[in-house]
Image (tube, rainbow, N blue to C red):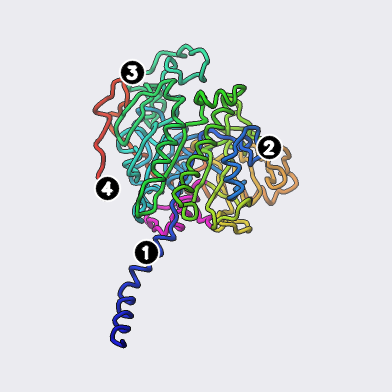
Amino acid sequence: MRRTCLGFLLLLTACAPTLARAAEAAERPNIILINIDDLGSRELGAWGGRFRTPALDRMAAEGRRMTDHYAAPVCSPSRAALLTGCYPKRVLPTPHVLFPGAAVGLHPDEQTIAEVLRAAGYATACIGKWHLGDQFPFLPLQQGFSEYFGLPYSNDMGPAAEGVKSNWGAPLPLPKSAPKGAGSTEDGTGIRTQQPPLPLLEGNTVIGRVGPAEQADLVRLYTERAVDYVQRPRTQPFFLYLAHNAVHFPLYPSAAFRERVPQSLLGAWIEEVDWSVGQVLAAVRAAGLERRTLVLFVSDNGGPLNHGSDNHPLRGGKGSTLEGGIRVPLLVWWPGRIPGGSNSSALTANPDLLPTLARLAGAGLSTGRRIDGVDISASLLGDPGPGARREFLYFRGLDLEAVRADTWKLHLARGELYHLGEDPGEARNVASQHPEVVARLRAIAAANVSDLGNTGVGPGCRPLGRTTSPRPLLAADGTVRADAIGPRPRFP
């Protein structure tokens, strides 16, 4: 008996490291990051919005609203910051967004959330809009994702004759000018302004051409893929990045939602996105994964006022560094870990997601590449304090236009100071009453000159990825350019 007990103890001792690793793996959450295109805060019921968003309202009731979260004014910079943990200017120093067939993209040496989590044993998938470069070296499979399905850029970057410059049901506009040649560029970065047909990709391969009918199917197609991914049997945790093209112009809700919200195409597409979120969360619950899954819902920038968005009470919209252009809704949901129905005004930003998700996943970060994000896990999980981030730099392209420290925001060129805690709509300039605050925020901006630079490309900006002989994925006649597609990489 004594010998048997001793043997059992020795067996437990030998198995202890394996059991500990298994317990640690069980604690690591699955992560679903849902990114919506051009969604203003005011559109959601949880922010007092005008459209029906029952799934997102439930997500807020069961999770946490982050009310002071910052992205970037436009698409590509926002996504670069979201995935790399850096200010967009550090990793994607371009004046605006990337266009089809561009010679540049997110450098393959940059470390994305997908690469960090895959190295820690996560399965990784990207579904939807990418917009960090459409040439082979820059596509999702080369940036840490094991699977990809979606559009490589915005749904308006195609020929007007195929409905991408007009909403569903609207007359097709005439092209403004003759298409530019394949070698023409908008600026020295090699960003092309050509508008080839929209390609749908599976992995690195073009599998379809997206016209008006396909645009109206995108939310459904992405959602079906996401639900399938969540429900697959697996022994490892997963990271799913679901990036809808909705609700970016042109507005193409499906027929079912056009019938539900006949008065507003924007409202119909927002309600369809809400349906999509409901389907994904239902899949998580049906798989019994709700207590092991962290879901984040965010917009890439504020809503565009010229397309009917409402960012009230914030001033401004997409493309600007006013609060309405860059402060976006962030919802976080993890039953049993995140307090339901809670709110946080802690200052958070897209670069913070990489270090935060890495910590929650028990993943290591490369020490050789500087990031700008901070770990905000305490704020997401319910800490009522001010949070780990105390400052935020508002970049518009290559220009630093504003600085925030705590609840103070200074517009640098105009010298306007706002207390965002009392005046989120930036209506009352109080610079003359608080010269010491103005001086403090200008000092923060001055310190950035030697890093990212307040104009142009600063010394702390890293190089863009660059490829030779770039080609659109689809030619003007819709044929696939074979030399634009590379092989699928092999992953361990």
Q: Residue at x 56, y 48 (%)?
A: 392
Q: Which residue is mark 1?
A: 22
Which numbered mark, 1 or 3, is in the foreground of this view? Answer: 1
First-in-chain label (4 vs 3) = 3
Q: Residues within 10 Å of mark 1 (few under 14, many from 20)?
A: few
SS assignment at label 1: helix
Q: Do the residues under discs 4 and 3 have CB atoms within 8 angstroms?
A: no
Residue range of the region highlighted in magenta in the rendering: 350-377
Residue 17: name its quadrant: bottom left
Which numbered mark, 4 or 2, is in the foreground of this view? Answer: 4
Label of residue 491 in the image: 4
Which numbered mark, 1 or 4, is in the foreground of this view? Answer: 1
Q: Residues within 10 Å of mark 3 (few under 14, many from 20)?
A: some
Q: Amino acid at mark 3?
A: Ala
Q: Amino acid at mark 4?
A: Phe
- In percent of width and height, residue 344 lies at 62, 51
- In percent of width and height, residue 104 lies at 36, 34
Nearest to the observer: residue 67 or residue 405: 67
Q: Which residue is mark 2?
A: 313
Q: Do the residues under discs 3 and 2 have CB atoms within 8 angstroms?
A: no
Q: Do the residues under discs 2 and 1 have CB atoms within 8 angstroms?
A: no
